[in-house]
Image: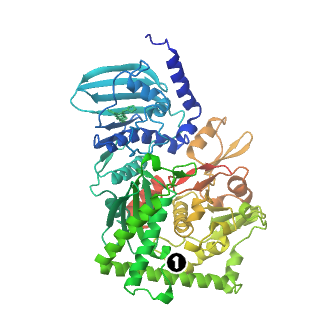
């Protein structure tokens, strides 16, 4: 067939891929950094599926110098036979939308991928894609360019005894503007996959910065728990158990440490269920019952004191809950795959957890005692905190409340969810913010210097810390287990700090506080970071404000002669009007919503940041601090 004579099916194919290029967000979620990384996940998921189906055990990802990515596996190799359309199978897999999903009948261990759109979407969004297949003693190759046009059809290029598939793709960077691949992002996700598949080895090589990582975990999720807890002090060795019930495979690893927070991460068919669901409910019920029954059996808790609350027995707990559920039982709640619906999962996880944990406690009395002792302390602290709050709410507002109310410049509007609370670094910026704000909807709470590092703090320490007390009082929705976001006095809590490393550190300290003691505030998308401008530039139509170096370069090109540029070192360098206009006015400010997309790794990142290992902290802030913050929200 000559190069440019397309038959009907080719035209249909190109129209299909054209649709992807027109609205990439429909297929990969967005065309920012996250969308760019979805291209990698799509290709890698095909390799992971091959491993899950029992073929191959090694995946290699290379970030090439030319900004392309190569993924290779040692599976069976994509079939190279002709497809009924008269095209080769690889051509169909990589050019027909939603084709090539390798859901072989009867095996339910599919990895999630992003709606399983497969490699054809990646091809559509790539300048070029090169597929090399090792199979049947031969090496075959097919090449595409400009979003999926066949540049060279499938042909044999050599012989080899190896089997497997290698795909190299160069994203179309005009679609993914000023994004590039993050070695850390790819490593974190590949490490997680390696924890979930003990038989796999995954290598990540960065050709640009000459660094590489190798992930292989013989003990799977036990190693995962050890990894998350490596900066903490564990109370015992990781407890690992599994079982099958209602045709659902349950695999769980858990460990208590001396910290105060709980961190449960769950997966279904190797895909994270970030919003929990029936399996997590079953786990929490099972663990609470196991501890309460054990405590009663051995008189470790007095009947009059009542039983442990779920949160008491989960304080200091890290757990990985991983399920394999057959396709026919798989149900999710809501439109994302973040929350498991499958009803049978709840009793399955509850029963397996109760039986195994009860047995473990009976076999390990001293560990049982240490965990129950911790739960008892948590119970006492929780009850004391509730009493203190009730006292405060009963209007016995003591002197402390007076001090608190002076610092807080309240909003006058009564529509709470329309109101915004600005947490401003420093009294001077706080002063300007109070002057220029919209008094009806914007409240200002100036914060002096660094807030408490909540990594190791308990509720009582938080209660004692003036700055955090101020925040809790201003938001007025409680703390910890009692926090109820619907009670919040503000629809948005906006952290406004200088755009320097200190400012970033205060942001992270505050995010840590909210993550540990007001997590629903983040989960409901109510926590934001204000982005003050870094520069202003005099242009023919007045002053323009810019948030990044790139924006400044763009603006300079549009100005004749030598433009007058001002660099803002901090919030204090702007006058009140500038501060309002650039950073607070909903009409043209830019807010970044804080979303902790990955609790386990956010947990880990916070430890790295807040732990006592100084080196990782600096690297983490410089490389990742924007990673935790999602896209710009022009609100
Ligand atoms: C670097 C990316 O894409 N690996 C893949 C296979 C193996 C088979 C396969 C893929 C169409 C619909 C069946 C081989 N032999 N790595 C990859 N490895 N696709 S993609 O089949 C796709 C067919 O279902 C494969 C026997 N069965 C399947």
Q: Residue at x 49, y 11 (%)?
A: 5
Pick the front one: 267 or 447 = 267
Residue found 51% across the figure and 53% down from its top: 338
Report the side of 376 relative to 390 (left or right).
left
Label 1: which residue? Answer: 459
Residue drawn 46% across the image and 50% down it: 329
Identify the image's colour scheme: rainbow, by chain, secondary structure or one colour.
Answer: rainbow
| Above or below, 114 relative to 500 | above
Judge whether residue 465 can be spotted in this image.
yes
**Residue 117 drawn at (x, y percent):** 48, 36
Q: Nearer the viewer, residue 556 or 438?
A: 438
Vertical comparison of 180 with 227: above or below: above
Q: Position of residue 136 (x, y in %)?
A: 25, 27
Give the x, y percent position of residue 256.
Answer: 38, 72
Q: Residue pushed farthest front?
A: 246
Question: Can the viewer see residue 262?
Answer: no
* Residue 396 vertical placement versus 207 (above, below): below
Mark 1 packing: few (<14 Cα in 10 Å), some, or many (20+)?
some
| Outermost left residue | 161
Splitting the image into four quadrants, where does ligand 1 fall?
Answer: top left
Residue nearer the viewer, 311 or 499: 311
Q: How many marks?
A: 1
Q: Quadrant of the rendered structure where residue 428 is? A: bottom right
Q: Is residue 360 left or right of residue 591?
A: left
Coordinates of residue 318 in the picture (x, y in percent): 41, 66
SS at badge 1: helix
Left or right side of 55 for 614: right
**Badge 1 residue CB within 8 Å of ligand 1:** no
Query: In what quadrant of the picture does the N terminus appear?
Result: top left
């Amino acid at each position: 067939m000559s190069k440019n004579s397309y038959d009907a099916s080719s035209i249909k194919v190109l129209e299909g891929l054209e649709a992807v290029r027109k609205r990439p967000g429909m297929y990969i979620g967005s065309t920012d950094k996250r969308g760019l990384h979805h291209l990698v996940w799509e290709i890698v998921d095909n390799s992971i599926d091959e491993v899950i189906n029992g073929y191959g055990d090694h995946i290699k990802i290379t970030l090439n110098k030319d900004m392309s990515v190569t993924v290779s596996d040692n599976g069976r190799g994509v079939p190279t036979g002709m497809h009924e359309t008269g095209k080769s199978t690889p051509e169909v897999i990589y050019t027909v939308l939603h084709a090539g999903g390798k859901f072989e009948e009867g095996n339910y261990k599919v990895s999630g991928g992003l709606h399983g759109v497969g490699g054809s979407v990646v091809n559509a969004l790539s300048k070029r894609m090169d597929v090399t297949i090792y199979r049947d003693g031969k090496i075959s190759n097919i090449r595409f360019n400009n979003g999926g046009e066949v540049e060279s059809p499938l042909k044999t290029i050599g012989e080899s005894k190896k089997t497997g598939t290698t795909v190299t793709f160069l994203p179309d960077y005009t679609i993914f503007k000023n994004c590039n691949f993050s070695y850390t992002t790819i490593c974190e996700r590949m490490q997680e996959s390696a924890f979930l598949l003990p038989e796999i080895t995954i290598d990540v090589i960065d050709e640009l910065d000459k660094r590489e990582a190798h992930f292989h975990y013989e003990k799977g999720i036990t190693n995962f728990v050890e990894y998350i807890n490596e900066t903490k002090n564990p109370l015992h060795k990781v407890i690992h158990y599994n079982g099958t019930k209602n045709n659902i495979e349950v695999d769980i690893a858990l460990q208590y440490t001396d910290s105060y927070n709980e961190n449960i991460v769950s997966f279904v068919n190797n895909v994270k269920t970030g919003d929990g669901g029936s399996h997590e409910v079953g786990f929490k019920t099972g663990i609470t019952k196991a501890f309460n029954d054990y405590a009663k059996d051995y008189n470790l808790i007095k009947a009059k004191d009542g039983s442990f609350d779920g949160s008491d027995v989960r304080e200091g707990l890290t757990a990985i809950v991983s399920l394999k559920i057959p396709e026919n039982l798989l149900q999710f709640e809501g439109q994302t795959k973040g929350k498991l619906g499958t009803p049978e999962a709840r009793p399955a996880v509850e029963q397996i957890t109760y039986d195994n944990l009860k047995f473990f406690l009976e076999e390990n009395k001293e560990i049982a005692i240490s965990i129950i002792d911790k739960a008892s302390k948590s119970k006492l602290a929780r009850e004391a905190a509730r009493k203190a709050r009730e006292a405060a709410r009963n209007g016995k507002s003591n002197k402390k409340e007076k001090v608190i109310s002076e610092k807080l410049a309240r909003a006058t509007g009564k529509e709470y969810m329309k109101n915004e609370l600005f947490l401003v670094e420093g009294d001077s910026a706080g002063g300007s913010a109070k002057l220029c704000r919209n008094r009806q909807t914007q409240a200002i709470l100036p914060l002096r210097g660094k807030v408490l590092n909540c990594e190791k703090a308990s509720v009582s320490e938080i209660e004692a810390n003036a700055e955090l007390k101020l925040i809790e009082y201003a938001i007025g929705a409680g703390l910890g287990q009692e926090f109820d976001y619907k009670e919040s006095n503000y629809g948005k809590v906006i952290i406004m700090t200088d755009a320097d490393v200190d400012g970033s550190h205060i942001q992270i300290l505050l995010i840590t506080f909210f993550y540990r003691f007001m997590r629903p505030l983040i989960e409901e998308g109510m926590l934001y970071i204000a982005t003050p401008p870094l520069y202003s530039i005099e242009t023919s139509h007045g002053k323009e404000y810019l948030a990044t170096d790139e924006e400044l370069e763009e603006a300079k090109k549009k100005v004749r002669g030598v433009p007058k540029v001002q660099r803002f070192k901090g919030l204090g360098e702007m006058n009140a009007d500038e501060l309002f206009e650039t950073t607070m006015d909903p009409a043209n400010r830019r807010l970044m919503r804080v979303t902790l997309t990955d609790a386990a790794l956010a947990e880990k990142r916070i430890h790295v940041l807040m732990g006592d290992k100084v080196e990782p902290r600096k690297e983490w802030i410089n490389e990742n601090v924007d990673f935790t913050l999602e896209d710009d929200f022009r609100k």
